[in-house]
């Protein structure tokens, strides 16, 4: 035990000696430079401490550096908070769309009420708007779909309309708790009742591909007043979309065999290759309307 203690004591003394030697060599090698830094720092402090002009310059320089650092930190903080800001903007857009649709519905009811000489307004057809983000999308298949990050627990149900800020995007096909599958206009199974905004003639919109920005509006009578550039909107003849949502613009008019109808080529308002933010529309009458329509067809 005594030998072990002496061994540890000797090792400690040896390490201490090595440390002191290294420290001495450091001062020998860099002592001049370290002394220079010390004297420079002392001189700088004395100048700033006892000269008002130099002290003011020093304070201004420090404030400038601190402000620059704060600015960089604020930029970094703003960048990290962009996701929250985007969510807030999406919610605000949804509220604005909701308000716009309610105002349009109210105006239509007012016009109907005035023509019928009554003030029995219908308040059961209010439209709820849910913002969502597209998490998966396809545009190159005959049967394209896209998926949004909202599902049953967010209030999304099948047969709800989906729009963008530009116009119609599609219809909710299926949902689970957290996500929904949407049938877009650029799917060969999709059909949409649409009309010419200027003249009021309506027909059935379908997509046959392959271009993801062009659809066909059919069942328009040949005598209809249609011109290139006419705006195509939703007709309102379903409980999924209210009347007046943009669909696209007429780019070509073709005569169909027999001469009774014409076919319109429509450039779609929604750019499906850039889908990101969408809005899901909920009309309370949709399930009842669809059930009635199916029963009528049967």
Image (cartoon, helix red, strand yellow):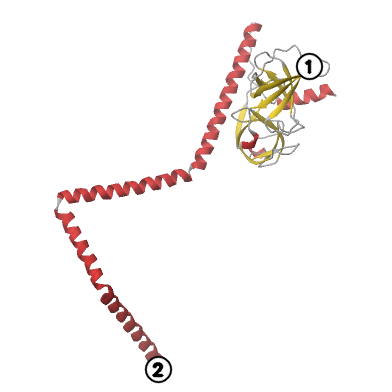
Q: Upstream in the sequence, badge 2 or badge 1?
A: 2
Which of the image's four quarters has the N terminus?
bottom left
From what the image shows, is residue 94 above or below residue 113? Answer: below
Q: Is residue 5 in view from this perspective? A: yes
In the image, taking residue 44 as reference, residue 161 lies left or right, namely right
Q: Which mark is residue 243?
A: none
Relative to the observer, which residue lies in front, 256 or 220?
A: 256
- Point out the residue furthest to the right here: 298
Can you tell which quarter of the image residue 270 is in?
top right
Task: Report which residue position mark 2 lands on.
Answer: 3
User: Looking at the picture, how far across and down is residue 28, in whole percent?
Assistant: 26, 77
Crowdedness of circle 2 by 10 Å Cα count: few (<14), some, many (20+)?
A: few
Measured in 3D between alpha carbons, the distance from the residue under mark 2 to the one under mark 1, in whole angstroms, is 113 Å
Relative to the observer, which residue lies in front, 280 or 123?
A: 280
Relative to the observer, which residue lies in front, 282 or 53?
A: 53
User: Looking at the picture, how far across and down is residue 7, in whole percent?
Assistant: 39, 90
Can you tell which quarter of the image residue 177 is in?
top right
Task: Report which residue position mark 1 lands on.
Answer: 261
User: Looking at the picture, how far across and down is residue 118, in whole percent?
Assistant: 64, 8
Q: Residue at x 44, y 43 (%)?
A: 78
């Amino acid at each position: 035990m005594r030998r072990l203690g002496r061994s540890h004591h000797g090792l400690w003394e040896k390490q201490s000696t090595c440390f002191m030697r290294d420290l001495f060599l450091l001062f020998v090698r860099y002592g001049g430079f370290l002394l220079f830094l010390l004297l420079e720092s002392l001189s700088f402090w004395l100048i700033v401490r006892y000269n008002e002009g130099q002290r003011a310059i020093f304070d201004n320089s420090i404030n400038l550096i601190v402000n620059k650092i704060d600015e960089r930190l604020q930029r970094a903080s703003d960048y990290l908070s962009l996701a929250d800001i985007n969510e807030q903007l999406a919610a605000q857009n949804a509220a604005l769309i909701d308000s716009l649709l309610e105002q349009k519905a109210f105006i239509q009811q007012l016009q109907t009420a005035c023509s019928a000489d009554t003030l029995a307004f219908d308040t059961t057809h209010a439209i709820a708007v849910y913002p969502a983000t597209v998490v998966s999308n396809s545009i190159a298949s005959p049967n394209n779909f896209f998926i949004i990050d909202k599902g049953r627990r967010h209030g999304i149900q099948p047969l709800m309309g989906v729009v963008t800020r530009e116009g119609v995007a599609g219809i909710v096909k299926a949902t689970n708790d957290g996500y929904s599958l949407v049938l877009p206009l650029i799917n060969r199974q999709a059909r949409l009742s649409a009309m010419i905004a200027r003249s009021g003639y309506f027909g059935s919109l379908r997509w046959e591909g392959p271009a993801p920005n062009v659809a066909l509006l059919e069942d328009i009578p040949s005598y209809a007043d249609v011109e290139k550039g006419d705006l195509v909107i939703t007709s309102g003849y379903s409980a999924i979309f209210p009347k007046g949502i943009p669909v696209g613009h007429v780019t070509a008019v073709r005569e169909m065999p027999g001469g009774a109808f014409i076919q319109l080529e429509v450039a779609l308002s929604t750019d499906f290759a850039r889908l990101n933010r969408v809005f899901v529309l909920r009309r309370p009458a949709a399930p009842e309307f669809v059930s009635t329509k199916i029963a009528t067809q049967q």
